[in-house]
Image (spheres, grey):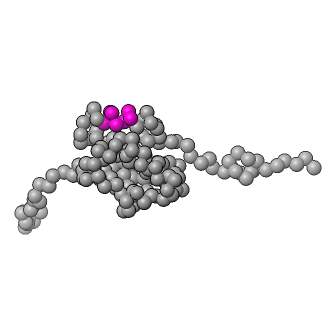
C-alpha cells in the first residue's frame, strides 16, 4: 500500500529566525555595475571585501565618499553596506559604486525606518547631484560599416 509522503517522518520546523533587515540595490555607469547590499549593522562600508577607504585611484576616492560626506556619518552608523563591482573602467566603476551606495541607503530608510527621513535623504542627494540616484542612459554607439567608427566615414576619392 502507498503511504502519503507526509506521514513518513514528522517535519521538523526550524526555530523562527527574525527576518534580516536588508536591501539590495545596484548602480550603473556605462558597462560598470555595482551591487550594494545594505543591512542593519555598525557602519561598515566594504568594496569587494576590502574597506572603502582603500579605493584606487586616490583622486576619485572623494567621489565614492560623496554620499557619506553629504549625509553625515551618523546616517551610515546603523547600517553595513557591502558592494560588489565589475565591468567598465575604473572611473565608471567609481560612479557606479557611489550610485549604489546612495540608492541602497535611500531604499533601506524607505523600507525599515520612515518615509520622512527617506525623503529628506533623497532631496539632499538629488539637490547635490542627480547622478547619485538616477542612472545615466548614455552608452557607446556601435561601429558601422564603411568607416572607422560609429560616425566617421572613409575618405571618398573621385579619381
- 14 relative to 149, above or below: below
Image coordinates of residue 150 in percent, x first then y, are: 68, 48
- 2 relative to 74, above or below: below
Q: What secondary structure predominates along the stretch shown in magenta?
A: helix
Q: Is residue 16 left or right of residue 104?
A: left
Which of 7 and 147 lies nearest the eye of the viewer?
147
Question: What residue is drawn where x is 82% and y is 49%?
Answer: 155
Residue 128 in sight here? yes
Residue 32 in sight here? no
Question: What residue is drawn where x is 54% and y is 56%?
Answer: 89
Q: Is residue 146 magenta?
A: no
Which of 63 and 20 lies nearest the eye of the viewer?
63
Question: What residue is drawn where x is 74% and y is 51%?
Answer: 147
Image coordinates of residue 91 in percent, x first then y, are: 53, 52
Question: What residue is drawn where x is 43% and y is 33%?
Answer: 127
Quadrant assignment, res 45: bottom left
Highlighted magenta segment, given as a residue range:
118-124
Image coordinates of residue 133 in percent, x first then y, are: 42, 40
Amino acid at each position: 500500500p502507498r503511504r502519503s509522503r507526509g506521514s513518513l517522518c514528522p517535519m521538523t520546523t526550524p526555530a523562527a529566525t527574525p527576518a534580516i533587515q536588508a536591501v539590495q540595490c545596484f548602480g550603473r555607469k556605462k558597462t560598470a555595475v555595482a551591487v550594494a547590499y545594505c543591512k542593519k549593522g555598525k557602519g561598515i562600508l566594504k568594496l569587494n571585501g576590502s574597506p572603502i577607504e582603500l579605493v584606487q585611484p586616490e583622486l576619485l576616492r572623494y567621489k565614492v565618499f560623496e554620499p557619506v560626506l553629504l549625509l553625515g556619518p551618523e546616517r551610515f552608523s546603523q547600517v553595513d553596506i557591502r558592494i560588489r563591482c565589475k565591468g567598465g573602467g575604473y572611473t565608471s566603476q567609481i560612479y557606479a559604486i557611489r550610485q549604489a551606495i546612495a540608492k541602497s541607503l535611500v531604499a533601506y530608510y524607505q523600507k525599515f525606518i520612515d518615509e520622512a527621513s527617506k525623503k529628506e535623504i533623497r532631496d539632499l542627494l538629488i539637490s547635490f547631484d542627480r547622478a547619485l540616484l538616477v542612472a545615466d542612459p548614455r552608452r557607446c554607439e556601435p561601429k558601422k560599416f564603411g568607416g572607422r567608427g560609429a560616425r566617421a566615414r572613409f575618405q571618398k576619392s573621385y579619381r
